[in-house]
Amino acid sequence: MNFIHTADIHIGAFPHTVLRKANLESLEKIVELALSENVKNVIVAGDLFETPRLGHETTLNVVRIIKKGVREGLRFIVTPGSHDLTARGHGVLSILGEVGLVHLTKHEEKNYKLYLKPLEVDGVVFYGLPGLRGEREVEYLERRKVVYEDYDENKDNILIAHTGLYIYSGIDISKISPKYSMIKLSEEAYASIHKHFKYLALGHIHFPIPYSEFFEGNVAYPGSPIGRDANDIYETYILKKKLRTNRRVLLVNLRRNAASIKALTNNFGIDVEVVETYGLENVADEVKRKIRDMNEKYRCIIVYTGKISIEKYSRVRKMINDVARSLNAWVHIVRSEPAEEYITFLEEFRSDLSNIEELEKEAIEQALKKFGLKLSPEIILNLISTLGREYSEGMRKTEINEEVADEAFKILEQVYGELKK
Protein backbone atom coordinates (compact mmCIF):
# COMPACT_ATOMS: atom_id res chain seq x y z
CA MET A 1 0.00 0.00 0.00
CA ASN A 2 1.08 3.54 -0.82
CA PHE A 3 -0.34 6.47 1.10
CA ILE A 4 0.15 10.12 2.01
CA HIS A 5 1.02 10.77 5.66
CA THR A 6 0.27 14.23 6.99
CA ALA A 7 -0.73 15.78 10.33
CA ASP A 8 -1.39 19.02 12.20
CA ILE A 9 -3.12 20.88 9.38
CA HIS A 10 -4.94 23.07 11.96
CA ILE A 11 -7.69 24.42 9.72
CA GLY A 12 -9.09 27.46 11.52
CA ALA A 13 -5.77 28.70 12.87
CA PHE A 14 -4.65 32.32 12.45
CA PRO A 15 -8.21 33.73 12.69
CA HIS A 16 -8.70 37.40 11.81
CA THR A 17 -5.30 37.60 10.03
CA VAL A 18 -4.20 37.45 6.39
CA LEU A 19 -3.30 33.77 7.00
CA ARG A 20 -6.84 32.75 7.98
CA LYS A 21 -7.39 30.72 4.78
CA ALA A 22 -3.84 29.36 4.42
CA ASN A 23 -4.39 26.16 6.42
CA LEU A 24 -7.60 25.37 4.54
CA GLU A 25 -5.78 25.85 1.24
CA SER A 26 -3.01 23.52 2.45
CA LEU A 27 -5.61 20.73 2.68
CA GLU A 28 -6.57 21.45 -0.91
CA LYS A 29 -2.90 21.22 -1.91
CA ILE A 30 -2.50 17.90 -0.05
CA VAL A 31 -5.42 16.48 -2.05
CA GLU A 32 -3.73 17.64 -5.27
CA LEU A 33 -0.43 16.03 -4.23
CA ALA A 34 -2.16 12.74 -3.40
CA LEU A 35 -3.92 12.65 -6.75
CA SER A 36 -0.75 13.55 -8.63
CA GLU A 37 1.08 10.65 -6.95
CA ASN A 38 -1.79 8.28 -7.79
CA VAL A 39 -2.32 7.14 -4.20
CA LYS A 40 -5.72 6.29 -2.75
CA ASN A 41 -5.24 6.83 0.98
CA VAL A 42 -4.45 9.99 2.95
CA ILE A 43 -3.58 9.47 6.62
CA VAL A 44 -4.07 12.46 8.91
CA ALA A 45 -2.37 11.89 12.27
CA GLY A 46 -4.43 14.32 14.30
CA ASP A 47 -5.28 18.03 14.51
CA LEU A 48 -6.93 18.35 11.15
CA PHE A 49 -8.65 21.30 12.81
CA GLU A 50 -7.55 24.07 15.15
CA THR A 51 -10.80 23.88 17.09
CA PRO A 52 -13.68 21.37 17.17
CA ARG A 53 -16.20 23.81 15.69
CA LEU A 54 -15.54 26.05 12.71
CA GLY A 55 -17.47 28.83 11.07
CA HIS A 56 -20.13 27.95 8.51
CA GLU A 57 -18.11 29.02 5.44
CA THR A 58 -14.93 27.22 6.53
CA THR A 59 -16.88 24.04 7.29
CA LEU A 60 -18.51 24.08 3.85
CA ASN A 61 -15.11 24.58 2.19
CA VAL A 62 -13.64 21.62 4.12
CA VAL A 63 -16.56 19.45 2.95
CA ARG A 64 -16.07 20.65 -0.63
CA ILE A 65 -12.35 19.80 -0.63
CA ILE A 66 -12.78 16.37 0.93
CA LYS A 67 -15.75 15.50 -1.31
CA LYS A 68 -13.64 16.36 -4.34
CA GLY A 69 -10.93 13.98 -3.13
CA VAL A 70 -13.45 11.22 -2.41
CA ARG A 71 -14.99 11.60 -5.88
CA GLU A 72 -11.49 11.13 -7.33
CA GLY A 73 -11.06 7.91 -5.34
CA LEU A 74 -9.24 9.16 -2.21
CA ARG A 75 -9.90 7.79 1.27
CA PHE A 76 -9.12 9.95 4.31
CA ILE A 77 -8.11 7.96 7.39
CA VAL A 78 -8.03 10.26 10.41
CA THR A 79 -7.16 9.96 14.09
CA PRO A 80 -8.35 12.80 16.35
CA GLY A 81 -5.74 15.13 17.78
CA SER A 82 -6.00 17.21 20.91
CA HIS A 83 -7.63 20.10 19.01
CA ASP A 84 -10.19 18.19 16.94
CA LEU A 85 -12.97 17.22 19.34
CA THR A 86 -14.62 18.52 22.50
CA ALA A 87 -14.34 16.59 25.75
CA ARG A 88 -17.57 14.80 24.74
CA GLY A 89 -16.24 13.87 21.31
CA HIS A 90 -18.16 16.47 19.31
CA GLY A 91 -16.92 18.59 16.43
CA VAL A 92 -16.68 18.99 12.68
CA LEU A 93 -14.39 15.93 12.51
CA SER A 94 -16.99 13.66 14.15
CA ILE A 95 -19.61 14.90 11.65
CA LEU A 96 -17.29 14.13 8.72
CA GLY A 97 -16.91 10.63 10.15
CA GLU A 98 -20.65 10.15 10.63
CA VAL A 99 -21.47 11.08 7.03
CA GLY A 100 -18.68 8.88 5.66
CA LEU A 101 -16.39 11.54 4.22
CA VAL A 102 -13.52 10.37 6.43
CA HIS A 103 -12.67 7.05 8.07
CA LEU A 104 -12.30 8.00 11.72
CA THR A 105 -10.41 5.67 14.04
CA LYS A 106 -12.22 4.82 17.27
CA HIS A 107 -11.06 4.48 20.85
CA GLU A 108 -12.55 4.05 24.32
CA GLU A 109 -11.32 4.88 27.80
CA LYS A 110 -12.57 2.42 30.40
CA ASN A 111 -11.29 0.55 33.45
CA TYR A 112 -8.15 2.75 33.48
CA LYS A 113 -7.18 1.53 30.01
CA LEU A 114 -7.26 2.98 26.51
CA TYR A 115 -8.84 0.60 24.00
CA LEU A 116 -8.04 1.17 20.31
CA LYS A 117 -10.51 -0.24 17.79
CA PRO A 118 -9.28 -1.72 14.50
CA LEU A 119 -10.23 -0.05 11.22
CA GLU A 120 -9.57 -2.16 8.11
CA VAL A 121 -9.08 -0.42 4.76
CA ASP A 122 -7.86 -2.26 1.66
CA GLY A 123 -6.59 -5.19 3.73
CA VAL A 124 -4.54 -2.94 6.03
CA VAL A 125 -5.60 -2.54 9.66
CA PHE A 126 -5.33 0.92 11.24
CA TYR A 127 -5.33 1.72 14.94
CA GLY A 128 -5.59 5.32 16.12
CA LEU A 129 -3.98 6.66 19.29
CA PRO A 130 -5.75 10.01 19.84
CA GLY A 131 -4.27 13.15 21.32
CA LEU A 132 -5.97 13.39 24.73
CA ARG A 133 -6.25 16.35 27.08
CA GLY A 134 -3.31 16.63 29.45
CA GLU A 135 -1.31 14.21 27.25
CA ARG A 136 -3.07 11.27 28.90
CA GLU A 137 -2.28 9.07 25.92
CA VAL A 138 1.41 9.21 26.91
CA GLU A 139 0.53 7.99 30.42
CA TYR A 140 -1.50 5.11 28.99
CA LEU A 141 1.48 4.09 26.85
CA GLU A 142 4.01 4.39 29.67
CA ARG A 143 1.84 2.31 32.01
CA ARG A 144 1.28 -0.33 29.31
CA LYS A 145 -2.45 0.37 29.46
CA VAL A 146 -3.13 0.62 25.72
CA VAL A 147 -5.11 -2.31 24.31
CA TYR A 148 -5.08 -3.00 20.56
CA GLU A 149 -8.34 -4.87 20.12
CA ASP A 150 -8.42 -7.92 17.81
CA TYR A 151 -4.77 -7.44 16.87
CA ASP A 152 -3.59 -9.94 14.24
CA GLU A 153 0.15 -9.87 13.58
CA ASN A 154 -0.40 -11.77 10.34
CA LYS A 155 -1.97 -8.64 8.84
CA ASP A 156 -0.36 -5.34 7.91
CA ASN A 157 -1.02 -3.07 10.88
CA ILE A 158 -0.46 0.69 11.05
CA LEU A 159 -0.65 2.82 14.19
CA ILE A 160 -1.71 6.44 13.68
CA ALA A 161 -0.63 8.28 16.84
CA HIS A 162 -1.04 11.92 17.81
CA THR A 163 1.44 12.10 20.66
CA GLY A 164 4.95 13.06 21.70
CA LEU A 165 7.44 10.23 21.32
CA TYR A 166 11.20 10.48 21.70
CA ILE A 167 12.07 8.46 18.64
CA TYR A 168 15.64 9.44 17.79
CA SER A 169 18.37 9.19 20.41
CA GLY A 170 20.36 12.40 20.91
CA ILE A 171 17.88 14.81 19.31
CA ASP A 172 16.71 17.64 21.55
CA ILE A 173 13.87 19.26 19.63
CA SER A 174 13.40 21.81 22.42
CA LYS A 175 16.34 23.54 20.67
CA ILE A 176 14.12 23.97 17.62
CA SER A 177 11.60 26.00 19.59
CA PRO A 178 10.92 26.43 23.31
CA LYS A 179 7.35 25.24 22.77
CA TYR A 180 8.68 21.69 22.46
CA SER A 181 9.91 21.86 26.04
CA MET A 182 6.22 21.93 26.99
CA ILE A 183 5.49 18.67 25.16
CA LYS A 184 6.37 15.45 26.91
CA LEU A 185 8.56 13.35 24.63
CA SER A 186 8.68 9.90 26.12
CA GLU A 187 11.17 7.16 25.32
CA GLU A 188 9.26 4.81 27.59
CA ALA A 189 6.01 5.42 25.71
CA TYR A 190 7.75 4.71 22.41
CA ALA A 191 9.28 1.52 23.80
CA SER A 192 5.85 0.30 24.91
CA ILE A 193 4.29 0.37 21.43
CA HIS A 194 3.61 -2.99 19.85
CA LYS A 195 6.65 -3.99 17.79
CA HIS A 196 4.74 -5.55 14.91
CA PHE A 197 3.30 -2.38 13.40
CA LYS A 198 4.45 -1.91 9.84
CA TYR A 199 4.45 1.87 10.26
CA LEU A 200 3.91 4.48 12.97
CA ALA A 201 2.21 7.50 11.40
CA LEU A 202 2.90 10.21 13.96
CA GLY A 203 1.49 13.68 14.53
CA HIS A 204 1.71 16.42 17.18
CA ILE A 205 5.29 17.60 16.54
CA HIS A 206 5.13 20.34 13.92
CA PHE A 207 8.78 20.11 12.85
CA PRO A 208 9.55 17.30 10.34
CA ILE A 209 11.49 14.40 11.88
CA PRO A 210 13.58 13.14 10.22
CA TYR A 211 13.85 16.03 7.78
CA SER A 212 15.54 13.95 5.04
CA GLU A 213 14.10 13.94 1.53
CA PHE A 214 14.31 10.13 1.21
CA PHE A 215 14.62 7.56 3.99
CA GLU A 216 13.59 4.07 5.04
CA GLY A 217 12.08 3.14 8.38
CA ASN A 218 8.79 2.59 10.12
CA VAL A 219 8.24 5.84 12.03
CA ALA A 220 8.12 9.56 11.18
CA TYR A 221 6.65 12.95 11.99
CA PRO A 222 5.72 14.67 8.71
CA GLY A 223 5.48 18.01 10.49
CA SER A 224 2.75 20.58 9.96
CA PRO A 225 2.14 21.98 6.46
CA ILE A 226 1.81 25.51 7.90
CA GLY A 227 1.31 25.34 11.66
CA ARG A 228 -0.80 27.37 14.04
CA ASP A 229 1.36 30.15 15.54
CA ALA A 230 4.39 32.40 15.13
CA ASN A 231 6.76 29.66 16.29
CA ASP A 232 5.66 27.51 13.35
CA ILE A 233 6.14 30.35 10.89
CA TYR A 234 9.67 30.79 12.21
CA GLU A 235 10.29 27.04 11.81
CA THR A 236 9.33 27.43 8.15
CA TYR A 237 12.01 30.11 7.86
CA ILE A 238 14.59 27.74 9.41
CA LEU A 239 13.60 24.92 7.07
CA LYS A 240 13.87 27.12 3.99
CA LYS A 241 16.79 29.41 4.74
CA LYS A 242 19.01 27.29 6.98
CA LEU A 243 18.26 23.70 6.01
CA ARG A 244 17.45 24.28 2.33
CA THR A 245 14.26 22.23 2.50
CA ASN A 246 10.60 23.01 3.10
CA ARG A 247 7.33 21.96 4.69
CA ARG A 248 6.08 18.63 3.43
CA VAL A 249 3.82 15.62 3.44
CA LEU A 250 5.20 12.09 3.26
CA LEU A 251 4.66 9.57 0.49
CA VAL A 252 4.93 6.16 2.19
CA ASN A 253 5.39 2.88 0.34
CA LEU A 254 4.87 -0.11 2.65
CA ARG A 255 7.36 -2.90 2.07
CA ARG A 256 7.98 -6.25 3.73
CA ASN A 257 10.51 -5.08 6.35
CA ALA A 258 10.56 -1.28 6.27
CA ALA A 259 8.67 1.51 4.59
CA SER A 260 10.22 3.56 1.82
CA ILE A 261 9.45 7.22 2.51
CA LYS A 262 9.72 10.24 0.24
CA ALA A 263 9.17 13.84 1.38
CA LEU A 264 6.89 15.78 -0.95
CA THR A 265 8.06 19.29 -0.11
CA ASN A 266 5.90 22.29 -0.82
CA ASN A 267 5.67 25.99 0.04
CA PHE A 268 1.94 25.70 0.79
CA GLY A 269 1.76 29.31 -0.30
CA ILE A 270 3.97 30.61 2.53
CA ASP A 271 7.12 32.73 2.28
CA VAL A 272 8.97 33.99 5.37
CA GLU A 273 11.70 36.54 6.00
CA VAL A 274 13.37 37.78 9.18
CA VAL A 275 14.50 41.36 9.85
CA GLU A 276 16.70 42.53 12.72
CA THR A 277 16.50 46.20 13.57
CA TYR A 278 17.80 48.21 16.51
CA GLY A 279 16.14 51.54 15.95
CA LEU A 280 13.73 53.56 13.85
CA GLU A 281 16.06 54.43 11.00
CA ASN A 282 15.05 52.80 7.69
CA VAL A 283 13.08 50.02 9.42
CA ALA A 284 9.89 50.69 7.44
CA ASP A 285 11.80 50.70 4.13
CA GLU A 286 13.62 47.47 5.01
CA VAL A 287 10.41 45.67 5.94
CA LYS A 288 8.70 46.98 2.81
CA ARG A 289 11.56 45.78 0.62
CA LYS A 290 11.56 42.30 2.20
CA ILE A 291 7.81 41.92 1.73
CA ARG A 292 7.88 43.07 -1.89
CA ASP A 293 10.69 40.64 -2.71
CA MET A 294 8.58 37.65 -1.61
CA ASN A 295 6.73 35.73 -4.31
CA GLU A 296 4.31 33.44 -2.49
CA LYS A 297 0.63 34.21 -1.86
CA TYR A 298 1.13 34.57 1.89
CA ARG A 299 4.06 36.83 2.80
CA CYS A 300 5.21 36.59 6.41
CA ILE A 301 7.83 38.68 8.15
CA ILE A 302 9.27 38.36 11.66
CA VAL A 303 10.99 41.40 13.09
CA TYR A 304 13.43 41.36 16.01
CA THR A 305 13.79 44.84 17.49
CA GLY A 306 16.43 44.05 20.11
CA LYS A 307 16.09 45.21 23.73
CA ILE A 308 14.93 48.73 22.92
CA SER A 309 12.83 50.92 25.20
CA ILE A 310 9.08 50.34 25.41
CA GLU A 311 8.46 53.77 23.89
CA LYS A 312 10.71 53.09 20.92
CA TYR A 313 9.28 49.57 20.55
CA SER A 314 5.74 50.99 20.37
CA ARG A 315 6.78 53.38 17.59
CA VAL A 316 8.59 50.64 15.65
CA ARG A 317 5.64 48.30 16.08
CA LYS A 318 3.19 50.86 14.68
CA MET A 319 5.42 51.62 11.69
CA ILE A 320 5.87 47.93 10.84
CA ASN A 321 2.20 47.07 11.32
CA ASP A 322 1.21 49.93 9.03
CA VAL A 323 3.57 48.69 6.31
CA ALA A 324 2.39 45.09 6.65
CA ARG A 325 -1.25 46.13 6.54
CA SER A 326 -0.74 48.21 3.41
CA LEU A 327 0.93 45.27 1.65
CA ASN A 328 -1.46 42.60 3.01
CA ALA A 329 1.35 40.74 4.80
CA TRP A 330 1.48 38.83 8.09
CA VAL A 331 3.91 40.25 10.65
CA HIS A 332 5.19 39.20 14.07
CA ILE A 333 7.35 41.59 16.09
CA VAL A 334 9.63 40.41 18.89
CA ARG A 335 11.27 42.77 21.40
CA SER A 336 14.47 40.74 21.74
CA GLU A 337 17.41 39.45 19.74
CA PRO A 338 17.61 36.05 18.06
CA ALA A 339 19.64 33.65 20.22
CA GLU A 340 22.32 31.43 18.71
CA GLU A 341 21.53 27.80 19.44
CA TYR A 342 22.20 24.36 18.01
CA ILE A 343 20.06 21.43 17.02
CA THR A 344 22.05 18.25 17.68
CA PHE A 345 21.50 16.86 14.19
CA LEU A 346 21.55 20.21 12.36
CA GLU A 347 23.88 23.15 11.92
CA GLU A 348 23.67 26.28 14.02
CA PHE A 349 20.60 28.39 13.44
CA ARG A 350 18.72 31.25 14.99
CA SER A 351 15.99 30.70 17.50
CA ASP A 352 13.58 31.59 19.03
CA LEU A 353 10.26 33.29 19.57
CA SER A 354 9.42 33.94 23.18
CA ASN A 355 7.07 31.40 24.74
CA ILE A 356 4.69 32.77 27.30
CA GLU A 357 3.59 29.24 28.24
CA GLU A 358 6.97 28.63 29.88
CA LEU A 359 6.44 31.66 32.14
CA GLU A 360 2.89 30.54 32.88
CA LYS A 361 4.10 27.07 33.83
CA GLU A 362 6.75 28.47 36.18
CA ALA A 363 4.21 30.76 37.86
CA ILE A 364 1.73 27.90 38.24
CA GLU A 365 4.38 25.61 39.74
CA GLN A 366 5.23 28.28 42.32
CA ALA A 367 1.56 28.83 43.18
CA LEU A 368 0.86 25.10 43.55
CA LYS A 369 3.88 24.76 45.81
CA LYS A 370 2.84 27.77 47.89
CA PHE A 371 -0.65 26.40 48.54
CA GLY A 372 0.51 22.80 48.95
CA LEU A 373 -1.56 21.48 46.03
CA LYS A 374 -0.32 18.25 44.45
CA LEU A 375 -1.47 18.98 40.93
CA SER A 376 0.28 18.78 37.60
CA PRO A 377 0.90 22.30 36.21
CA GLU A 378 -0.09 20.94 32.78
CA ILE A 379 -3.67 20.47 34.03
CA ILE A 380 -3.90 24.14 35.03
CA LEU A 381 -2.25 25.24 31.76
CA ASN A 382 -4.83 23.18 29.89
CA LEU A 383 -7.63 24.91 31.82
CA ILE A 384 -6.14 28.36 31.06
CA SER A 385 -5.83 27.47 27.38
CA THR A 386 -9.42 26.22 27.25
CA LEU A 387 -10.90 29.27 28.99
CA GLY A 388 -8.85 31.63 26.80
CA ARG A 389 -9.78 30.02 23.48
CA GLU A 390 -10.26 32.42 20.59
CA TYR A 391 -13.39 32.57 18.49
CA SER A 392 -12.96 31.21 14.97
CA GLU A 393 -14.37 33.35 12.21
CA GLY A 394 -18.06 32.68 11.62
CA MET A 395 -18.64 30.90 14.94
CA ARG A 396 -21.55 31.86 17.17
CA LYS A 397 -20.77 32.84 20.75
CA THR A 398 -23.15 30.19 22.10
CA GLU A 399 -21.25 27.45 20.23
CA ILE A 400 -17.84 28.38 21.63
CA ASN A 401 -19.30 28.86 25.12
CA GLU A 402 -20.82 25.39 25.06
CA GLU A 403 -17.58 23.88 23.82
CA VAL A 404 -15.46 25.68 26.44
CA ALA A 405 -17.87 24.76 29.24
CA ASP A 406 -17.78 21.07 28.26
CA GLU A 407 -14.01 20.94 28.19
CA ALA A 408 -13.52 23.05 31.32
CA PHE A 409 -15.89 20.77 33.25
CA LYS A 410 -13.90 17.72 32.10
CA ILE A 411 -10.64 19.32 33.28
CA LEU A 412 -12.18 20.30 36.63
CA GLU A 413 -13.30 16.70 37.09
CA GLN A 414 -9.69 15.70 36.50
CA VAL A 415 -8.52 18.28 39.09
CA TYR A 416 -11.05 16.94 41.60
CA GLY A 417 -9.82 13.41 41.01
CA GLU A 418 -6.20 14.43 41.53
CA LEU A 419 -7.01 16.29 44.77
CA LYS A 420 -8.86 13.26 46.17
CA LYS A 421 -5.78 11.04 45.83
Image: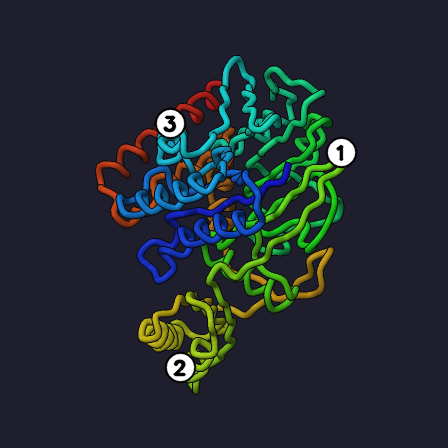
Residue 248 shown left or right of residue 367 in the figure: right
Numbered label attached to residue 98: 3
Q: Amino acid at mark 2?
A: Ala
Residue 288's spot in the image, x, y percent? Answer: 41, 80
Hey, which quadrant is residue 183 in on the image?
top right
Q: Residues within 10 Å of mark 3 (few under 14, many from 20)?
A: few
Please name the residue shown 52% across and 31% down the image.
130
Farthest residue, direction right: 257
Residue 190's spot in the image, x, y percent? Answer: 68, 33
Residue wearing tag 2: 284
Please name the residue shown 55% across and 59% down the image.
266
Dot 2 or dot 1: first in sequence order is 1
Dot 2 or dot 3: first in sequence order is 3
Can residue 397 be seen in this snapshot?
A: yes
Numbered label attached to residue 148: none
Which of 108/310 is in front? 108
